Image (cartoon, rainbow, N blue to C red):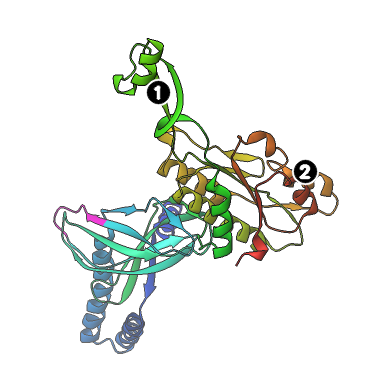
Amino acid sequence: MRLERFREFFRWFYRYRSLRVTPEGTKFLLLTLAIGLAALNTGNNLLYLLLAMMLSLIVTSGILSERCLRHLLIRRVIPEQLMANRPATMTVSLTNHQPTASSFSLRVMDVMAGTVVDRGIHILHLSAGASVSHSYPVLFTRRGRHRMDGVKIETRFPFGLFVKGANFFLVSDLVVYPELRPLPEHLVHDLAVLGHDQAVSKRGPGSGLYNLREYRQGDDSRAIHWKTSARQSRLIVKETETEDRRQVTLALPTGIPSDLALECFEQAVRLTASLAAYFLRQGFAVRLLIGAHEVSHGQGQDMGEPHRHRLFHALALCEASPVGQFDEAVDGLRALDGVRTLATRTAQGELTIVVMSWPDPSVEAACQGASRVVRAWETP
């Protein structure tokens, strides 16, 4: 029974604590061993006293270092938007919940995918009941999901003989958006020409005249068209046309040959994200077709930043569908999902842009009605 308790304790210690001997600690342990052997061989009481003092220092070091790591509350603040190859800032805060004891010489590190990442955060002194926050830069080189397993805190207190670490499980699932790159000048010029006359005539706030109709109860009296009302001897209200309400659909086929490097698809994803950012800045309502998955234009309160996050979130998590050697027909249809129905799913005057990651004749044939086909391998 006692043996099983010892095993459980060591399992717990291995999971939540780590212990490493420093070079100074190694020398101290060897010196302690030498004095112990000398005391046993000579029977000298002074050597026994010195051995007892050195052993007590080792025990005291373990007790005080453990006290530094107990009752620490850790919080991590993650930015709302993370993009590949773009530096971002995270913040970690520590609170010492011990009523009287302070913590000393704390080194804070992130744990990602089982790997400890040193962020250069070193807290020399954290008083009882006090809190401290530190910000540090992070950089993710690839899009998609990233997982932060927790935080590891180490201390050398009090004598620097051992480095004791404590693992705090603070799981954070991150979604990193694709990298945004500047579009080539020739492509920007072509897109500006395509979108110049693509305004969709819709009722809404604006200055242009959309329609004239009879006055209804509840209409704004400022919208009455007095000349027409006098001519027809009844109240006529003018409806304005929404200004610059342009729409664009970006289609990204996900089928690629199995022998094609995934970097080609990643280049197409980056280009699609850059196109989405460009059209959002130009005031377009952007819809996204990734294979068979669709992100609609968005309306009302869904526009703006929420819609932008939905677009980039879908691009961050999209995956290529490799075309196998024996199922080219099936995978070819998968590559055309969204593209083959593009003409029937777009409104009149809406821009349709297809981003291709590799030269596929079947996709090229299905894109005859698209406003523009952009080949990712031709775009730097």
Q: Which residue is mark 1?
A: 238
Residue 251 position within the rendered picture, expressed as x and y whole percent measured from the top left: 63, 46
The residue segment tinted magenta is 94-101
Considering only vertical position in the picture, is 270 above or below 235? below
**Looking at the image, which residue is at 16% across and 54% down?**
129
- The disc, 1 or 2, on the residue closer to the chain's N-terminal end is 1
**Looking at the image, which residue is at 31% across and 58% down?**
91
Q: Judge by depth and name the residue closer to the eye, 351 or 43.
A: 351
* Secondary structure predominantly adopted by residues drawn in magenta: loop
Report if residue 98 lies within the magenta region: yes
Q: Judge by depth and name the residue closer to the eye, 367 or 38.
A: 367
The quadrant holding residue 120 is: bottom left
Residue 374 position within the rendered picture, expressed as x and y whole percent measured from the top left: 65, 56
Residue 221 lies left or right of residue 255; in this view the side is: left
Residues tagged 1 and 2 counted as in contact (Cβ below 8 A): no
Q: Say how many tags the image has.
A: 2
Residue 225 visible? The answer is no
Q: Which residue is mark 2?
A: 333
